[in-house]
Amino acid sequence: MVILAGGQGSRFWPLSRASLPKQFLSLGDSGESLIQATVRRILPLVGGDNVAVVANPGLQPLIQEHVPKVRMICEPMAKNTAACIGLAAVTAQVARPDEDPVLVVLPADHAIRDDEKLRAALREAIDRAREERVLVTIGIPPTRPHTGYGYIKKGRLIEGRSFCVERFFEKPSIERAQKYLETGGYCWNSGMFAWRASVILESFASFLPQMAQGLAEIRRVLERDGEQKGAARVADIFASFESISIDFGVLEHAKNCVVVDAEEFGWNDVGSWDQWAENFARDAQGNLVKGDAVVIDSSGCVIRTAGRVVAAVGLKDVIVIDSGDALLVVSHEHVQEVRKVVDELKRRGRTDLV
């Protein structure tokens, strides 16, 4: 099991920072961080000895604090998901040279309401990847015309809930998303995958050949020198990789993709503050308040406080997030643009706030 934990989650500013990325935050009522929940829900499926977290070396103390028993694979620098997944695949081959291990790839920062239904979908994905040389993704039944997710068009039924993938579609306009919903036969792309190490690396050779060559060299370095002695050389090779997602780099080109059309298990990728708010019940005016707030004549608002009173009067569809040292105020319409705040703070040299 490979958990991708290298991102910062800049759309979760001001809580998410470089020193404490989103996956290490507790965004629910349980006190459990997102990465802790991810590991907990998959342990019954794979066991603790088969979980690896891929992240940059600077996050090692946080990983040891939150999930101390898992193995860490050091991603030398941020190069998007293709390079990260390729590194995990060759590391698995070196660790298990007599096998062709099935890798289940999960983001560290998703919210799930029904763990058992997720595990059922993953079991089917693992079986499909073990039996055939295919690239399997978990599809989520769409509940509304969401423009923030990628979509998958299902093709021929294979067996159970597994379908051939006819095509991947990137984040659509609201009109196109509505059409997908009305037409049927589409899933949201969850970003959860299963495939054998050899199969994904063959796909790299076909669609990202330069990266495939570099990954083969990384494997030789790891076999010869080990992870510690070979770290500098691995970092040099990794630095040359293109920064591209696994979706753009591989899946949208591959012809051997399968989607498991999962039974609804309450999935939320917690990509922004409005999506975080979907995990909680709202009041009669559609407001969600977490913390100490006075809300008057306001509707559709999301307010999270941090030890001081926040007062909101006459607001509609506004998100207010207080972290103690910074305050975010953004309309629902522009919530996806919060990362621009982080970019601007970096430009101003405000490293204390990013």
Image: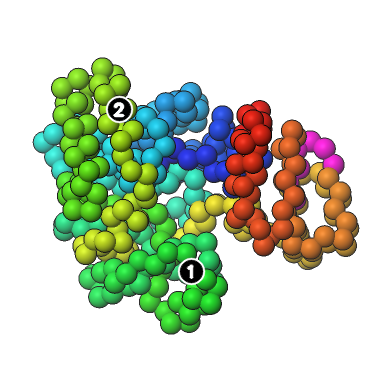
Asked if residue 202 shows in the view, the reply is yes
Crowd around label 1: few <14 · some 14–19 · many ≥20 (10 Å): some
Task: Give SS at disc 1.
Answer: loop
Q: Please state which of the two labelled residues, at mark 1 or mark 2, is closer to the viewer.
A: 2
Residue at image position (50%, 73%) is: 177
Rendering coords of residue 249 (x, y %) = 31, 53
Q: Along the horizontal axis of the image, is 342 left or right of 147?
A: right
Q: Is residue 274 above or below residue 78?
A: below
Task: Give SS at disc 2.
Answer: helix
Please name the amino acid that badge 1 sits on: Pro
Residue extending farthest front: 347
Q: Which residues are magenta?
A: 303-309
Asked if residue 163 shows in the view, the reply is no
Question: Image quadrant of residue 139?
Answer: bottom left
Q: Along the horizontal axis of the image, is 5 left or right of 99?
A: right
- Whichever of labels 1 and 2 marks the residue nearer the N terminus, that label is 1
Please name the amino acid that badge 2 sits on: Asp
Q: Is residue 224 above or below residue 102?
A: above
Q: Is residue 154 above or below residue 118?
A: below
Residue at image position (35%, 72%) is: 153
Question: Image quadrant of residue 250?
Answer: bottom left
Residue at image position (65%, 37%) is: 345
The verdict on residue 307 being magenta is: yes
Location of mark 1 (residue)? 172
Front in this rendered view, residue 181 or 327: 327
Rendering coords of residue 198 (x, y %) = 17, 46
Rendering coords of residue 100 (x, y %) = 15, 43
Residue at image position (18%, 32%) is: 217
Main secondary structure of the magenta stretch: loop
Rendering coords of residue 101 (x, y %) = 20, 43
Location of mark 2 (residue)? 236
